[in-house]
Amino acid sequence: MDPICHTLVGAGLARGGLARRTALGTTTLLVGANLPDVDVLAYLWGPAADLAFRRGWTHGVLALALWPFLLTGLMLAADRAVRTRRRPESPPAIPRELLLLSAVSIISHPILDTLNTYGVRWLMPFSGRWFYGDTLFIV
């Protein structure tokens, strides 16, 4: 999937009512839906590195267990920084809700990526095996 598709899924989750659970809900869902694609930065080391890391570590079970906590921490830091400067009277973000939104949006990413012909290495770093849905073609 491309970033537009992942962003639209995050937006759909937000419009579906999840964003109302806490402050920064929409932002968390949009960022989380795209976060596993941080592996695109491997391209800075060349196309071979990009292919080696693509849909691997950042899409694997270990990263999927850690990403929600990282994103929740970033969102809580952003909430404190913005709220104290711009809107001190607004209610703070709820950490448990941010963690839930992070987990839902982040897991949506490799699920969608599994549907296409390129696949995902779900078991990284324990196994490099690819899993494919073969239901969508990459153009």
Image (cartoon, rainbow, N blue to C red):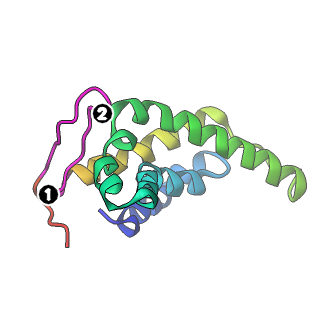
Residue 106 image position (x, y, % from top left) = 43, 45
Give SS at disc 1: loop
Q: Is residue 43 left or right of residue 67?
A: left
Give SS at disc 2: loop
Where, by quadrant of the figure, is residue 63 drawn?
A: top left
Residue at horizontal 27%, vertical 53%?
112
Q: Give the alpha-carbon distance from disc 1 to disc 2, as whole Å.
A: 18 Å
Quadrant occupied by the C terminus: bottom left
Residue at horizontal 61%, vertical 39%?
72
Q: Is residue 124 magenta?
A: yes
Whether 131 is drawn above or below 125: the answer is: below
- Neighbour tally class for label 1: few under 14, some 14-19, many 20 plus, Cα within 10 Å: some
Q: Is residue 107 left or right of residue 78?
A: left
Asked whether the beta carbons under mark 1 and mark 2 sit within 8 Å of each other, the answer is no
Q: Which range of residues does the magenta coloring cover?
A: 115-133
Residue 134 image position (x, y, % from top left) = 10, 55
Whether 92 is drawn above or below 96: the answer is: below
Q: Viewer-proximal residue, 110 or 22? A: 110
Residue depth check, mark 1 versus mark 2: number of the one nearer the observer? 2
Question: Type of residue at label 2?
Answer: Met
Q: Is residue 129 magenta?
A: yes
Question: Type of residue at label 1?
Answer: Thr
In this view, which residue lies farthest toward the left?
Answer: 134
Q: Which residue is mark 1?
A: 117
Quadrant occupied by the N terminus: bottom left
Asked whether the viewer can see residue 16, the reply is no
Residue 116 image position (x, y, % from top left) = 18, 57
Residue at horizontal 60%, vertical 32%?
96
Labelled disc at residue 124: 2
Labelled disc at residue 131: none
Residue 127 image position (x, y, % from top left) = 23, 29
